[in-house]
Image (cartoon, helix red, strand yellow):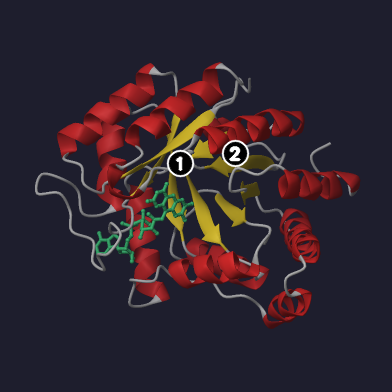
Amino acid sequence: MKTLSLKHRLTTNDPLFSVEFFPPKSEETAQQLLRTAKDIQAYNPDFVSITYGAGGSTRNRTLNYARKLHEDYGYAVMPHLTCVGHSREELKQTIAEFKSAGLKQIMALRGDPPKGETNFTPHPDGLKYANELVQLIREVYPECDLGVAGYPEKHPEAPSLEIDLLNLKRKVDAGATFVTTQLFFDNNAYFEFVDNCRRAGITVPILPGLMSVTSYKQALRFCDMCGTSIPAALNEQLIAAGNNKAAVEAIGIEWSYQQAHELLKRNAPGIHLYILNRSGPAIALMEKIQSVGFYK
Ligand SMILES: Cc1cc2nc3c(=O)[nH]c(=O)nc-3n(C[C@H](O)[C@H](O)[C@H](O)COP(=O)(O)OP(=O)(O)OC[C@H]3O[C@@H](n4cnc5c(N)ncnc54)[C@H](O)[C@@H]3O)c2cc1C
Protein backbone atom coordinates (compact mmCIF):
# COMPACT_ATOMS: atom_id res chain seq x y z
CA MET A 1 0.00 0.00 0.00
CA LYS A 2 1.29 3.48 -0.87
CA THR A 3 1.80 5.52 2.28
CA LEU A 4 2.59 9.01 0.98
CA SER A 5 -0.48 11.25 0.93
CA LEU A 6 -1.60 12.23 -2.55
CA LYS A 7 -0.88 15.87 -1.82
CA HIS A 8 2.73 15.06 -0.95
CA ARG A 9 3.05 12.47 -3.69
CA LEU A 10 2.11 15.14 -6.23
CA THR A 11 5.01 17.32 -5.11
CA THR A 12 7.61 14.66 -6.02
CA ASN A 13 9.10 14.61 -9.51
CA ASP A 14 8.07 11.01 -10.18
CA PRO A 15 5.04 10.82 -12.46
CA LEU A 16 1.92 9.50 -10.81
CA PHE A 17 -0.07 6.58 -12.22
CA SER A 18 -3.75 6.01 -11.46
CA VAL A 19 -6.69 4.14 -12.93
CA GLU A 20 -10.44 4.56 -12.79
CA PHE A 21 -12.98 1.82 -12.13
CA PHE A 22 -16.75 1.93 -12.15
CA PRO A 23 -18.91 -0.09 -9.73
CA PRO A 24 -20.10 -3.28 -11.46
CA LYS A 25 -23.76 -4.29 -11.62
CA SER A 26 -23.59 -8.07 -12.04
CA GLU A 27 -21.61 -10.97 -10.60
CA GLU A 28 -19.83 -11.41 -13.94
CA THR A 29 -18.76 -7.77 -14.20
CA ALA A 30 -17.78 -7.81 -10.51
CA GLN A 31 -15.40 -10.68 -11.25
CA GLN A 32 -13.96 -8.70 -14.14
CA LEU A 33 -13.29 -5.70 -11.91
CA LEU A 34 -11.60 -7.87 -9.27
CA ARG A 35 -9.44 -9.64 -11.89
CA THR A 36 -8.41 -6.28 -13.28
CA ALA A 37 -7.65 -4.97 -9.79
CA LYS A 38 -5.33 -7.94 -9.29
CA ASP A 39 -3.72 -7.68 -12.76
CA ILE A 40 -2.76 -4.03 -12.42
CA GLN A 41 -1.18 -4.45 -8.98
CA ALA A 42 2.08 -5.20 -10.79
CA TYR A 43 2.11 -1.60 -12.07
CA ASN A 44 1.76 -0.16 -8.58
CA PRO A 45 -0.85 2.57 -9.14
CA ASP A 46 -0.62 5.53 -6.77
CA PHE A 47 -4.36 5.38 -6.41
CA VAL A 48 -7.41 3.84 -8.02
CA SER A 49 -10.63 5.80 -8.28
CA ILE A 50 -14.16 4.44 -8.38
CA THR A 51 -16.99 6.38 -9.97
CA TYR A 52 -20.33 7.37 -8.51
CA GLY A 53 -23.38 6.56 -10.61
CA ALA A 54 -26.04 8.88 -11.92
CA GLY A 55 -28.65 9.97 -9.40
CA GLY A 56 -26.64 8.54 -6.51
CA SER A 57 -27.75 5.13 -7.77
CA THR A 58 -24.43 3.46 -7.01
CA ARG A 59 -23.80 5.00 -3.58
CA ASN A 60 -23.56 1.67 -1.75
CA ARG A 61 -21.73 -0.08 -4.56
CA THR A 62 -19.20 2.76 -4.81
CA LEU A 63 -18.62 2.55 -1.07
CA ASN A 64 -18.45 -1.27 -1.00
CA TYR A 65 -16.01 -1.55 -3.90
CA ALA A 66 -13.93 1.34 -2.55
CA ARG A 67 -13.63 -0.59 0.73
CA LYS A 68 -12.86 -3.85 -1.04
CA LEU A 69 -10.16 -2.35 -3.26
CA HIS A 70 -8.62 -0.69 -0.21
CA GLU A 71 -8.85 -3.56 2.27
CA ASP A 72 -8.39 -6.63 0.05
CA TYR A 73 -6.02 -5.22 -2.59
CA GLY A 74 -4.20 -2.56 -0.56
CA TYR A 75 -4.98 0.27 -2.93
CA ALA A 76 -5.19 3.92 -1.99
CA VAL A 77 -8.75 4.44 -3.23
CA MET A 78 -10.38 7.66 -4.32
CA PRO A 79 -14.16 7.26 -4.35
CA HIS A 80 -16.06 9.76 -6.46
CA LEU A 81 -18.99 11.64 -4.98
CA THR A 82 -21.63 13.69 -6.82
CA CYS A 83 -24.28 16.15 -5.64
CA VAL A 84 -27.03 14.51 -7.73
CA GLY A 85 -30.15 13.70 -5.72
CA HIS A 86 -28.53 14.21 -2.31
CA SER A 87 -29.22 16.66 0.49
CA ARG A 88 -26.30 18.25 2.35
CA GLU A 89 -26.95 15.89 5.26
CA GLU A 90 -26.81 12.81 3.03
CA LEU A 91 -23.59 14.05 1.47
CA LYS A 92 -22.10 14.64 4.91
CA GLN A 93 -23.03 11.13 5.93
CA THR A 94 -21.37 9.63 2.84
CA ILE A 95 -18.22 11.69 3.40
CA ALA A 96 -18.13 10.45 7.01
CA GLU A 97 -18.45 6.85 5.75
CA PHE A 98 -15.57 7.34 3.31
CA LYS A 99 -13.53 8.69 6.19
CA SER A 100 -14.33 5.84 8.54
CA ALA A 101 -13.44 3.35 5.77
CA GLY A 102 -9.93 4.86 5.82
CA LEU A 103 -10.23 6.45 2.36
CA LYS A 104 -8.03 9.51 2.30
CA GLN A 105 -9.01 11.09 -0.99
CA ILE A 106 -12.31 11.96 -2.68
CA MET A 107 -13.16 13.13 -6.21
CA ALA A 108 -15.74 15.93 -5.76
CA LEU A 109 -18.22 16.32 -8.63
CA ARG A 110 -21.52 17.93 -9.38
CA GLY A 111 -22.57 14.99 -11.55
CA ASP A 112 -24.68 14.81 -14.68
CA PRO A 113 -28.48 15.14 -14.72
CA PRO A 114 -30.21 11.75 -14.33
CA LYS A 115 -31.10 9.86 -17.55
CA GLY A 116 -33.88 11.54 -19.51
CA GLU A 117 -33.23 14.99 -17.96
CA THR A 118 -31.26 17.68 -19.75
CA ASN A 119 -30.76 20.20 -16.94
CA PHE A 120 -29.16 19.61 -13.58
CA THR A 121 -31.66 20.29 -10.79
CA PRO A 122 -30.15 20.30 -7.33
CA HIS A 123 -31.84 18.53 -4.42
CA PRO A 124 -33.94 21.13 -2.51
CA ASP A 125 -31.53 20.85 0.44
CA GLY A 126 -28.54 20.04 -1.71
CA LEU A 127 -25.71 21.64 -3.66
CA LYS A 128 -25.69 23.24 -7.07
CA TYR A 129 -22.05 23.10 -8.14
CA ALA A 130 -18.97 21.04 -7.39
CA ASN A 131 -17.22 23.99 -5.68
CA GLU A 132 -19.90 23.79 -2.96
CA LEU A 133 -19.17 20.08 -2.52
CA VAL A 134 -15.44 20.80 -2.21
CA GLN A 135 -16.29 23.30 0.52
CA LEU A 136 -18.55 20.81 2.32
CA ILE A 137 -15.91 18.06 2.23
CA ARG A 138 -13.32 20.52 3.55
CA GLU A 139 -15.66 21.24 6.50
CA VAL A 140 -16.43 17.59 7.31
CA TYR A 141 -13.09 15.97 6.44
CA PRO A 142 -10.49 18.76 6.24
CA GLU A 143 -7.42 16.51 5.93
CA CYS A 144 -8.81 14.64 2.91
CA ASP A 145 -7.10 15.07 -0.49
CA LEU A 146 -9.58 16.33 -3.04
CA GLY A 147 -9.70 15.88 -6.80
CA VAL A 148 -11.97 17.90 -9.10
CA ALA A 149 -12.80 17.60 -12.80
CA GLY A 150 -11.28 19.82 -15.49
CA TYR A 151 -12.27 20.04 -19.14
CA PRO A 152 -9.52 20.77 -21.69
CA GLU A 153 -12.18 21.05 -24.41
CA LYS A 154 -14.73 22.85 -22.15
CA HIS A 155 -17.57 21.41 -20.12
CA PRO A 156 -20.53 20.97 -22.51
CA GLU A 157 -22.78 23.31 -20.50
CA ALA A 158 -20.24 26.14 -20.13
CA PRO A 159 -20.80 29.14 -22.41
CA SER A 160 -17.04 29.55 -23.02
CA LEU A 161 -13.66 28.13 -22.08
CA GLU A 162 -12.92 31.31 -20.11
CA ILE A 163 -16.06 31.00 -17.96
CA ASP A 164 -15.43 27.29 -17.46
CA LEU A 165 -11.94 28.12 -16.24
CA LEU A 166 -13.26 30.68 -13.74
CA ASN A 167 -15.57 27.96 -12.43
CA LEU A 168 -12.67 25.52 -12.17
CA LYS A 169 -10.81 28.15 -10.17
CA ARG A 170 -13.74 28.30 -7.71
CA LYS A 171 -13.24 24.57 -7.04
CA VAL A 172 -9.52 24.97 -6.52
CA ASP A 173 -9.96 28.05 -4.33
CA ALA A 174 -12.48 26.08 -2.24
CA GLY A 175 -9.70 23.58 -1.48
CA ALA A 176 -9.14 21.06 -4.29
CA THR A 177 -5.73 19.38 -4.14
CA PHE A 178 -5.54 18.55 -7.84
CA VAL A 179 -7.51 18.40 -11.10
CA THR A 180 -8.12 15.29 -13.21
CA THR A 181 -9.07 16.05 -16.79
CA GLN A 182 -11.87 14.72 -18.89
CA LEU A 183 -10.56 12.25 -21.46
CA PHE A 184 -8.94 13.80 -24.52
CA PHE A 185 -7.19 12.45 -27.61
CA ASP A 186 -5.39 15.61 -28.67
CA ASN A 187 -2.50 16.54 -26.38
CA ASN A 188 -2.54 20.13 -27.64
CA ALA A 189 -5.90 20.56 -25.90
CA TYR A 190 -4.26 19.50 -22.61
CA PHE A 191 -1.17 21.68 -22.97
CA GLU A 192 -3.26 24.75 -23.88
CA PHE A 193 -5.62 24.03 -20.99
CA VAL A 194 -2.71 23.84 -18.53
CA ASP A 195 -1.27 27.13 -19.86
CA ASN A 196 -4.68 28.80 -19.52
CA CYS A 197 -5.12 27.42 -16.00
CA ARG A 198 -1.72 28.79 -14.95
CA ARG A 199 -2.59 32.19 -16.42
CA ALA A 200 -5.89 32.11 -14.50
CA GLY A 201 -4.00 31.43 -11.24
CA ILE A 202 -4.84 27.72 -10.96
CA THR A 203 -1.60 26.29 -9.64
CA VAL A 204 -2.52 22.74 -8.51
CA PRO A 205 -1.33 19.68 -10.49
CA ILE A 206 -3.48 18.81 -13.52
CA LEU A 207 -3.53 15.07 -14.10
CA PRO A 208 -4.32 14.12 -17.72
CA GLY A 209 -7.06 11.52 -18.20
CA LEU A 210 -6.50 9.06 -21.06
CA MET A 211 -8.56 6.27 -22.54
CA SER A 212 -7.40 3.64 -25.05
CA VAL A 213 -10.18 3.23 -27.60
CA THR A 214 -11.45 -0.35 -27.75
CA SER A 215 -14.62 0.32 -29.74
CA TYR A 216 -15.18 3.11 -32.26
CA LYS A 217 -18.91 3.27 -31.52
CA GLN A 218 -18.29 3.56 -27.80
CA ALA A 219 -15.61 6.23 -28.31
CA LEU A 220 -18.03 8.28 -30.44
CA ARG A 221 -20.71 7.96 -27.75
CA PHE A 222 -18.37 9.03 -24.93
CA CYS A 223 -16.98 11.93 -26.96
CA ASP A 224 -20.46 13.11 -27.83
CA MET A 225 -21.46 13.00 -24.16
CA CYS A 226 -18.45 14.82 -22.80
CA GLY A 227 -17.54 17.18 -25.65
CA THR A 228 -14.21 15.54 -26.52
CA SER A 229 -13.01 15.68 -30.12
CA ILE A 230 -11.42 12.82 -32.05
CA PRO A 231 -8.47 14.02 -34.16
CA ALA A 232 -8.85 13.34 -37.89
CA ALA A 233 -5.82 11.00 -37.97
CA LEU A 234 -7.28 8.79 -35.22
CA ASN A 235 -10.73 8.90 -36.77
CA GLU A 236 -9.39 7.75 -40.14
CA GLN A 237 -7.49 4.83 -38.61
CA LEU A 238 -10.51 3.70 -36.62
CA ILE A 239 -12.80 3.88 -39.63
CA ALA A 240 -10.30 1.89 -41.70
CA ALA A 241 -10.17 -0.81 -38.99
CA GLY A 242 -13.94 -1.30 -39.31
CA ASN A 243 -15.22 -4.27 -37.33
CA ASN A 244 -11.77 -5.73 -36.72
CA LYS A 245 -11.78 -5.58 -32.91
CA ALA A 246 -8.11 -6.48 -32.53
CA ALA A 247 -7.08 -3.79 -35.01
CA VAL A 248 -9.22 -1.17 -33.22
CA GLU A 249 -7.65 -2.10 -29.87
CA ALA A 250 -4.14 -1.94 -31.31
CA ILE A 251 -4.85 1.53 -32.73
CA GLY A 252 -6.30 2.64 -29.39
CA ILE A 253 -3.28 1.42 -27.43
CA GLU A 254 -0.75 2.95 -29.81
CA TRP A 255 -2.57 6.31 -29.78
CA SER A 256 -2.78 6.47 -25.98
CA TYR A 257 0.85 5.34 -25.71
CA GLN A 258 1.95 8.19 -27.99
CA GLN A 259 -0.14 10.58 -25.90
CA ALA A 260 1.27 9.29 -22.60
CA HIS A 261 4.82 9.39 -23.91
CA GLU A 262 4.58 13.02 -24.99
CA LEU A 263 2.72 14.06 -21.83
CA LEU A 264 5.31 12.49 -19.53
CA LYS A 265 8.23 13.82 -21.59
CA ARG A 266 6.74 17.28 -21.26
CA ASN A 267 6.41 16.88 -17.48
CA ALA A 268 2.73 16.19 -16.96
CA PRO A 269 2.33 15.11 -13.30
CA GLY A 270 1.39 11.58 -14.38
CA ILE A 271 -1.40 9.77 -16.20
CA HIS A 272 -4.86 8.70 -15.11
CA LEU A 273 -6.34 5.87 -17.18
CA TYR A 274 -10.03 5.40 -17.83
CA ILE A 275 -9.86 1.62 -18.12
CA LEU A 276 -13.57 0.68 -18.04
CA ASN A 277 -12.68 -2.18 -15.64
CA ARG A 278 -10.51 -3.92 -18.27
CA SER A 279 -6.86 -4.64 -17.70
CA GLY A 280 -5.70 -5.58 -21.24
CA PRO A 281 -5.26 -2.13 -22.85
CA ALA A 282 -3.94 -0.61 -19.59
CA ILE A 283 -1.27 -3.30 -19.25
CA ALA A 284 -0.28 -3.02 -22.92
CA LEU A 285 0.08 0.74 -22.50
CA MET A 286 2.07 0.44 -19.26
CA GLU A 287 4.41 -2.16 -20.79
CA LYS A 288 5.12 0.17 -23.71
CA ILE A 289 5.62 3.22 -21.53
CA GLN A 290 7.91 1.30 -19.16
CA SER A 291 9.98 0.07 -22.13
CA VAL A 292 10.96 3.69 -22.86
CA GLY A 293 12.01 4.34 -19.27
CA PHE A 294 8.93 5.70 -17.46
CA TYR A 295 7.54 4.14 -14.25
CA LYS A 296 10.61 1.96 -13.73
C1 LIG B 1 -12.33 13.06 -13.96
C2 LIG B 1 -13.83 13.00 -14.05
C3 LIG B 1 -14.53 12.08 -13.26
C4 LIG B 1 -15.92 12.01 -13.31
N1 LIG B 1 -16.58 11.09 -12.52
C5 LIG B 1 -17.93 11.07 -12.51
C6 LIG B 1 -18.65 10.18 -11.63
O1 LIG B 1 -18.05 9.39 -10.89
N2 LIG B 1 -20.00 10.20 -11.66
C7 LIG B 1 -20.70 11.06 -12.47
O2 LIG B 1 -21.94 11.04 -12.43
N3 LIG B 1 -20.06 11.91 -13.30
C8 LIG B 1 -18.69 11.94 -13.33
N4 LIG B 1 -18.04 12.82 -14.16
C9 LIG B 1 -18.82 13.69 -15.05
C10 LIG B 1 -19.26 15.00 -14.33
O3 LIG B 1 -20.13 14.68 -13.27
C11 LIG B 1 -19.95 15.88 -15.36
O4 LIG B 1 -19.05 16.35 -16.30
C12 LIG B 1 -20.83 16.99 -14.79
O5 LIG B 1 -21.66 17.48 -15.82
C13 LIG B 1 -20.06 18.16 -14.22
O6 LIG B 1 -19.45 17.86 -13.04
P1 LIG B 1 -18.38 18.89 -12.40
O7 LIG B 1 -17.97 18.35 -11.11
O8 LIG B 1 -17.32 19.23 -13.38
O9 LIG B 1 -19.34 20.17 -12.20
P2 LIG B 1 -19.08 21.69 -11.93
O10 LIG B 1 -17.65 22.00 -11.67
O11 LIG B 1 -20.08 22.12 -10.89
O12 LIG B 1 -19.44 22.34 -13.34
C14 LIG B 1 -20.68 22.08 -14.00
C15 LIG B 1 -21.01 23.20 -14.96
O13 LIG B 1 -21.40 24.38 -14.22
C16 LIG B 1 -20.49 25.46 -14.42
N5 LIG B 1 -20.22 26.00 -13.06
C17 LIG B 1 -19.46 25.43 -12.09
N6 LIG B 1 -19.50 26.18 -10.96
C18 LIG B 1 -20.30 27.24 -11.23
C19 LIG B 1 -20.74 28.34 -10.44
N7 LIG B 1 -20.36 28.48 -9.16
N8 LIG B 1 -21.56 29.24 -11.04
C20 LIG B 1 -21.96 29.11 -12.33
N9 LIG B 1 -21.58 28.05 -13.12
C21 LIG B 1 -20.77 27.14 -12.56
C22 LIG B 1 -19.24 24.85 -15.07
O14 LIG B 1 -18.58 25.78 -15.91
C23 LIG B 1 -19.83 23.67 -15.83
O15 LIG B 1 -20.34 24.06 -17.07
C24 LIG B 1 -16.64 12.89 -14.16
C25 LIG B 1 -15.92 13.80 -14.98
C26 LIG B 1 -14.55 13.85 -14.93
C27 LIG B 1 -13.80 14.81 -15.80
What residue lies at 44% left-to-right and 19% top-to-bottom?
102
Up/down of 274 relative to 65, above or below: below
- Give the image location of residue 259, x and y in percent: 73, 62
Up/down of 205 relative to 296, above or below: below
Tell whether 175 sits left or right of 258: left
Residue matched to label 1: 177
Tell whether 152 sits left or right of 234: left
Residue 285 got which mark?
none
Q: Of residues 162 and 87, which is closer to you in this image?
A: 87
Ligand 1 shows up in the quarter that is: bottom left
Secondary element under disc 1, as helix, strand or loop, is loop
What residue lies at 43% left-to-right and 64% top-to-bottom?
200
- Give the image location of residue 210, x and y in percent: 63, 56
* Callout 2 amino acid: Leu
Q: Earlier in the sequence, mark 1 or mark 2?
A: 2
- Give the image location of residue 46, x and y in percent: 63, 33
> In the image, is the residue at mark 2 within 8 Å of ligand 1 by its beta carbon?
no
Residue 42 visible in the picture = yes
Tell whether 14 sits left or right of 72: right
Q: Mark 1, residues whose alpha carbon is within 10 Å: few (<14), some, or many (≥20)?
A: many
Q: Mark 2, residues whose alpha carbon is within 10 Å: few (<14), some, or many (≥20)?
A: many
Secondary element under disc 2, as helix, strand or loop, is loop
Residue 10 got which mark?
2
Give the Cα distance between marks 1 and 2: 9 Å
- Give the image location of residue 219, x and y in percent: 59, 66
What residue lies at 66% left-to-right and 40% top-to-bottom?
16
Tell me, yes or no, whether the two marked residues, 1 and 2, touch with CB atoms within 8 Å: yes
Q: Of residues 223 and 75, which is closer to you in this image?
A: 223
